[in-house]
Amino acid sequence: MKAKTLSYEVKTFGCQMNVHDSQRLSGLLEDAGYVPAAVGTDADILVFNTCAVRENADNKLYGNLGQLVERKAENPDFQIAVGGCLAQKDKDTIVAKAPWVDVVFGTHNIGSLPALLERARANREAQVEIIEALETFPSDLPTKRESTYSALVSISVGCNNTCTFCIVPSLRGKERDRRPGEILSEIKALVAEGVIEITLLGQNVNTYGVEFGDKGAFAKLLRACGEIEGLERVRFTSPHPAAFTDDVIDAMAETDNVMPQLHMPLQSGSDRVLKEMRRSYRSEKYLGILDRVREAIPDAAISTDIIVGFPGETEEDFQETLRVVREAKFAIAYTFQYSKRPGTPAAELPNQLPKEIVQDRYERLLELVNEIAWQENKKQIGKTVQVLIGDSEGRKDEQTNRLTGRAKDNRLVHIDWVATDFPRPGDLVEVEVVDAKPYFLIAKAGEQPKLKRTIAGDAYDRLQAQSCAVPEPSKQQVGVISLNVAVKPSHE
């Protein structure tokens, strides 16, 4: 009798680095013969790719695992795997707290997942494998992307910084850089598949090259991306203000396909708090970087991360953050309440703030950043913007008659579409912005909008044709669930 083909689902928590890891996990599982679970059905294998940055990460994971006890009891062949940063941090604790888990693997050995699942199935006992150092750069692993037009490309992993609030370096290790030739080869291969937008990923992208001794390597990489035919858009996340140099600004300004968008984490506007955080820059340096970026790229949209309630933060410190926010005029600000993480220096600092004070400051900050974002978005009204129609975003909303995509500066754009010629996901269209909200723009396409059909749209058409030619169960998409991804960059 033919063996049953097992299905899988990957649930993703956290940052874009985790999303990329989940794409690799999906690729590995499909290479091993597993198939994506059909929508609305229970997978035979459920993989949690976890995050450990926020305080509630543990509660979120164990809450999810607790809901699976009954399902596991009813079907002992159902397998649960836990990987990612929380797995790297907690190691054997996960199986101790949730003995129904079958596999635990860390950030450095995602390639081991298929073998660990097979071993757990054969031995009928949990398999825990956590290694402390990276053996194979994870981008060497197969990848299953959700998008036909956009891809994440890892240029480095790990981080050499020692921010007191951050647990990432202890979980991802020291920075490891890929060689430029490997990165460019991967990008060219992606373009050949129909990808027209790539995002370069690293915990700290602008220190790329430190491992092989080239401080200018990141700027050179951006310029090299500009020479790849068919590559329409290049983005990157996240840089660190302390290492952000003018050669990168020049490369952004002078490379046509590098988008006018910059994510630059601030964390705090108080120089005293920045020192306590071990962030090796101060507010004036930070604002000076933004000034130089806007001088070179006037239409650049700048986003940031901000933490409120760091231990010892005073009202005066918080007011300094508000001052910097007003001066910076962020298009988007991702705001976080300080989260005490065991194992970080900040967790041992005195003067941990009461929840009510942190909440009050968070709400005041959120009100300010939303108002500024709205004002910045209003400046786009009347402008013509080029929008890349997205995969899930790009589907027409039957109620509003709108399509959705991203402008060059990464602003979300909803398009009132009246033309009969519809763009495909991955196509580019020029539209006029007619209204603005704090989180998105509204644009209008005329009866004959300027529409550029791309290789990405062609790839989407081919994929749709292939889907129509196979039985219904095989038409389901990869089961990667991304939580907090749209609002959380790769380095906090």
Image: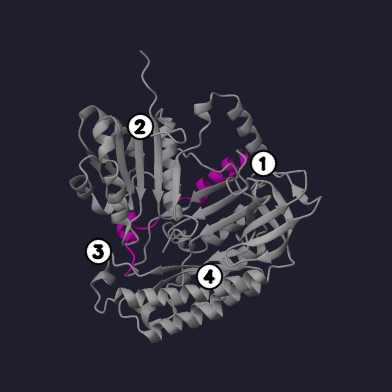
Q: CA distance from mark 1 to mark 2?
A: 33 Å
Where on the picture, by quarter, is residue 73?
top left
Q: Nearer the viewer, mark 3 or mark 4?
A: 3
- Mark 3 highlights which residue? 343
Q: Nearer the viewer, mark 1 or mark 2?
A: 2
Residue at the image position 30 percent from the left and 32 percent from the top? 78
- Three-letter amino acid code at the position of disc 1: Gly
- Mark 1 highlights which residue? 457
| Local crowd size for mark 3, using a 10 Å CA cut-off: few (<14), some (14–19), many (≥20) | some
- Verify CB contact (< 8 Å) between mark 2 and mark 4: no
Upstream in the sequence, badge 2 or badge 4? 2
Q: Percent from the top left, x then y, of residue 284? A: 49, 82
Viewer-side residue, 154 vs 195: 195
Mark drawn on residue 245: 4
As drawn, the residue found furthest toward the top would be: 1
SS under mark 4:
loop
